[in-house]
Amino acid sequence: MAKTGQYDPKPEHKFSFGLWTVGNRGRDPFGDAVRESIGPAALVDLLGEVGVWGVNLHDNDLVPIDATPSQRDQIVREFKKACQRNGIVVPMATVSLFFHPVFRDGAFTANDPEVRGYAIQKTLRAMDLGAELGAKIFVLWAGRDGAETDGCRRADIAVKRMREAINYLCEYNIEKKYGYKFALEAKPNEPRGDIYFATTGHYLGLIPTLDHPEMVGLNPEVAHETMAGLNFMHGVAQAWEAGKLFHIDLNDQAPGRYDQDLRFGSHNLKAAFWLVKFLEDVGYNGSRHFDAHAGLHAHVSDFERESQAMECRQRDPDNSEAG
Amino acid sequence: MAKTGQYDPKPEHKFSFGLWTVGNRGRDPFGDAVRESIGPAALVDLLGEVGVWGVNLHDNDLVPIDATPSQRDQIVREFKKACQRNGIVVPMATVSLFFHPVFRDGAFTANDPEVRGYAIQKTLRAMDLGAELGAKIFVLWAGRDGAETDGCRRADIAVKRMREAINYLCEYNIEKKYGYKFALEAKPNEPRGDIYFATTGHYLGLIPTLDHPEMVGLNPEVAHETMAGLNFMHGVAQAWEAGKLFHIDLNDQAPGRYDQDLRFGSHNLKAAFWLVKFLEDVGYNGSRHFDAHAGLHAHVSDFERESQAMECRQRDPDNSEAG
Amino acid sequence: MAKTGQYDPKPEHKFSFGLWTVGNRGRDPFGDAVRESIGPAALVDLLGEVGVWGVNLHDNDLVPIDATPSQRDQIVREFKKACQRNGIVVPMATVSLFFHPVFRDGAFTANDPEVRGYAIQKTLRAMDLGAELGAKIFVLWAGRDGAETDGCRRADIAVKRMREAINYLCEYNIEKKYGYKFALEAKPNEPRGDIYFATTGHYLGLIPTLDHPEMVGLNPEVAHETMAGLNFMHGVAQAWEAGKLFHIDLNDQAPGRYDQDLRFGSHNLKAAFWLVKFLEDVGYNGSRHFDAHAGLHAHVSDFERESQAMECRQRDPDNSEAG
Amino acid sequence: MAKTGQYDPKPEHKFSFGLWTVGNRGRDPFGDAVRESIGPAALVDLLGEVGVWGVNLHDNDLVPIDATPSQRDQIVREFKKACQRNGIVVPMATVSLFFHPVFRDGAFTANDPEVRGYAIQKTLRAMDLGAELGAKIFVLWAGRDGAETDGCRRADIAVKRMREAINYLCEYNIEKKYGYKFALEAKPNEPRGDIYFATTGHYLGLIPTLDHPEMVGLNPEVAHETMAGLNFMHGVAQAWEAGKLFHIDLNDQAPGRYDQDLRFGSHNLKAAFWLVKFLEDVGYNGSRHFDAHAGLHAHVSDFERESQAMECRQRDPDNSEAG
């Protein structure tokens, strides 16, 4: 696919996508998958075709949780080849601490010390994997760390357990010389009734209490803050101002409902405008990661329109009139 | 299990449960199932053990969508036997118009006339099944009939298609002498960005425009109205006053988030109190259907506590102080 | 002010404004008024200057609640003169059943029969006033008819009282040959914790139970449905399809918060687009009433931009690409 | 009023009330005041009668904004006498940076440097007043510091201005040896569309970046976090764990709507239970400030029931069953 137009994505735009979104099968709580499964290497080929810069992944997006070491190595080899032949980098890696039933009560904050220990170990392995792929950002989303009733644990204990876990990961990062920056991702609820560290603000409050605060920042996500009806850009701006905007998840969402992961700008164009304007004005230079799922009837990738829209906004000399 | 205490459920309480809740496997958008699958007959045995009056079902809770006619008949025979040996009735039946990928764009309001036709036919078969099991209430939840963007169809067209479908079902009900009352179930969103007929009120507005309005009423659900932050009891009261409270789904929910299907009374006890008081005061005599899923770590049935709580509220001479 | 451009408002656009919005002083629960009071006639002059078609009013926007009959007549005379000299009509009138402390427990549904009687009488006088000014639409917003705790009255009693009140108003309308259409305006909450008839749907359910259903329809308001996170256009479409879209209040709102009455299209342009497209596609021919308050620092009227925006959308041959 | 029962409030409970709540006149955006104005000294007498420990105030709750210095001194003298004769202390003072029209665009973050300067000066005078009354907690609620459109200022500039203002106030506190702890109070919206520092978490993120972080903590309010649908107790627990729970505002609220300031525990008893249990379990020893307004028809003080309810919960040996 030739990329010659002014709206074509270029590497310096740092447009990245996650295997879990481009490969999303459209399953939801009320319905079965509507799309076939596509393997990681094939997804990378698709991304390469449309000029994407980076691909991100959870450990189990790439390596099944029950893969043997040799299977794992084989999978990683093929994935790296796919990245190389498409000129695509892996800027960010993360870990699934939510899909397996063992995390039903949480991961880093679970009451069972064996689960907490397993969550840590699983994360270390995911860090190894990401490092092998060249990732320099490691995202942590503690999606199961929350409660439906606060009888399960005292909420300040959850804070302490989260701190302890992150401190441990930082030590490992130092010891292994991986050079990761950790980017914490907040969400107010779903899949738990209330998730600890509900917003970008709450994580900004945690970071200064860590052993290595300089190593830890934020990965704000449009949909997550919007679920709580908050002004996403305000949280992003506070994170930026604190030097903590390490990564960003661009998508969209109607407030006060389930996590929609809509295409960036598709629900509230005005909010998207002010966000893009802010990022451009301050010179944000990290990944522009589009964390949207295709709608259930989508047959084509929507990201081209996204990247065009972003380009378009950047170039408009006259955006000062919006309001 | 002996049932002699004053808080034991009795048939006159009309406590009913759905196969899809007691058999719920605890899968969610971010995680795999946490419980084993249990067959319909075994679920009925469990319900019988704890004194439940009625069991409700979607067609495919009982009969797999790809069952052959003889498999279907075999399954139904065994299910009826299980009901008989447990003294449990089937007061309500419904149809899944949301799980299969064919409904990704809706069922009765889908743009593809073949999908609309299939949705109707699937519902007729579900009506046959329910009638065979003795059900007199048929619930319709049009969960996929909605939109993420209103470019997909004009919303008044959706109203017309819904009316046409329900009119057709009413004719079939008359022709077959099934004697069903249809109970429409509203929901504001999820799995669609916005579902048509978002609240009990919206369906109350549709019913008088149907060919057989006397045959059609409501099945309000606590969680669904609460998702939109509405006072559930107010909607129930309007439905009751209009003679349209044909069924009710009791569960609980925090406002402004994903469909939680929490245990009735577990989130907002005050709202549950005023609802139960209303139902008792006006003499509601339909099913008291508990539409809650067990939490992910639940090991025991919670419905006993529910029925006790309801009994307790009924008996309290002093509930006039609440406020 | 010369009106020659293609984006200038014209009478056939039926752009109307309420005295309570253009004269809004910017008081809110946490702050004092930020603008001077302007008299009704002066407001009409301002509207005339910018080419507005119609002006709407509550009884007490024009006539103070404690005016003597002769004061009232004097005020009305001057107002009519102002309308005439500006070529402005009064398409809609309504009644304040919320500002005076006597309505603290509601108006048509209040527990005190004297309050209910007074609310009716006040409404009859407002109908007289509107008729004198030529209004053919009479809006009813029962903003205080709700509850913070449902101990105050049974919610089905509220439904009956509302019905009784509207029936009475219809009889008066017939007797006086005023020829009004009543347009009911729903709102989920504020100033009450929960207002009865929370959405357009709930009123659509009430109307068929009235003595004169043909005389009563809806006045949906963008902000009110959006407060509950509902898709406003879906409710409008259902009202239209039922032949009940008698009036519409155009403004904007972020979901899940206080009533903002923002400028139409200023929060969610996509939702505004689909609404305007729907109204144009179906040929809605009623008032296009802009029910927005100026922001606290506004010095100039924003309605010109509104009317231009609407014109612009109407004329765009290419709006089929939106999504 | 004799105070001998086990549910009577005692000084060690540190139950406090604000002049703005007990003197609240029940005005709202849609209606006029429903109660007479009562002077500060008379309010203190009412609080004394029912055994309250402390009274809190904004500067202008006590001293009108346009009082002369001698009027101010006279008012303060009478107020101190009223406190003394009732054995009531002034644990907390705060400043109104929201009522006067000059703050229409914000106070500490306003674009006009004169407004920012005035906001600082007004706060210094309020600190003088509080110090004179013996207050050791100074609450800051920046209720006007927000936006309806982000064209008004870049959100990171707002962060910087807020920091600068708080740093200045801390210096004054040191210079004057007032010994205040500042308690920052977050709110997501209202009266602004979006208020900067939307949650307790966001302020927790700001504090470590201040010049005197040890001097600054939080004043979380039930209603404010609940407006955004967040679990209030989780935010409180994080603040406590960080050593920053300097004050607390107890009231109640339905999620996703206007600021209701309902009586503590009146909307969601379960949430109130877990909050009280947390505060008691960790040994919180600050003010228990009830920040609720009376409902519009209230004639008697509700706080006795509140204090009883709290006592009751504290004493219940069996609260481990809740959930």
Image (tube, coloured by chain):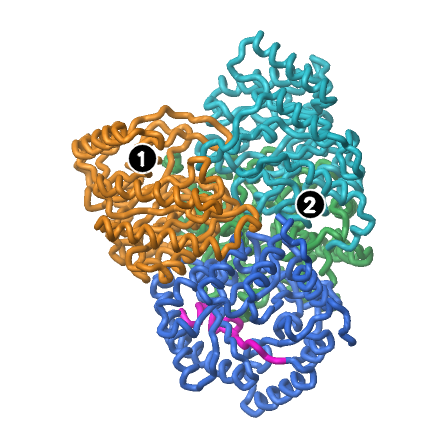
Chain colours: A green, B blue, C orange, D cyan
Q: Quarter-wise, where is residue B145 in the image? A: bottom left
**On screen, D2 above or below B94?**
above
Q: Nearer the viewer, residue C310 or C42?
A: C42
Which residue is nearer to you in this view: D254 or B116?
A: D254
Q: Position of residue B321 (x, y in %)?
A: 64, 49
Pinpoint residue B281: horizontal percent, then vertical percent.
57, 61
Residues tagged 1 and 2 counted as in contact (Cβ below 8 A)? no
Res. A83 in view: no
Q: CA distance from mark 1 to mark 2?
A: 43 Å
Callout 1: chain:
C
Q: Secondary structure at mark 1?
A: helix
Numbered label attached to residue D272: 2
Please check the rendered image and state whether residue B29 is part of the magenta-colored stretch, yes or no. Answer: no
Q: Work out which quarter of the rendered image holds the N terminus of chain B and state it.
A: bottom right
Magenta-colored span: B89-109
Q: Check residue C19 in the rendering and tell me which mark sits there, or answer none.
A: 1
Q: Which residue sits at x=54%, y=57%? A: B233
Q: Position of residue A214 (x, y in %)?
A: 70, 37
Question: Mark number for residue A168?
Answer: none
- Does mark 2 fall on the same chain as mark 1? no
Q: Within 10 angstroms of label 1, few (less than 14), some, or many (20 or more) residues?
A: many
In percent of the image, x 50 and y 44: which residue is there?
C192
Above or below D77: residue C105 = below
Amino acid type at mark 1: Leu
Q: Residues within 10 Å of mark 2 (few under 14, many from 20)?
A: many
Q: Amino acid at mark 2?
A: Ala
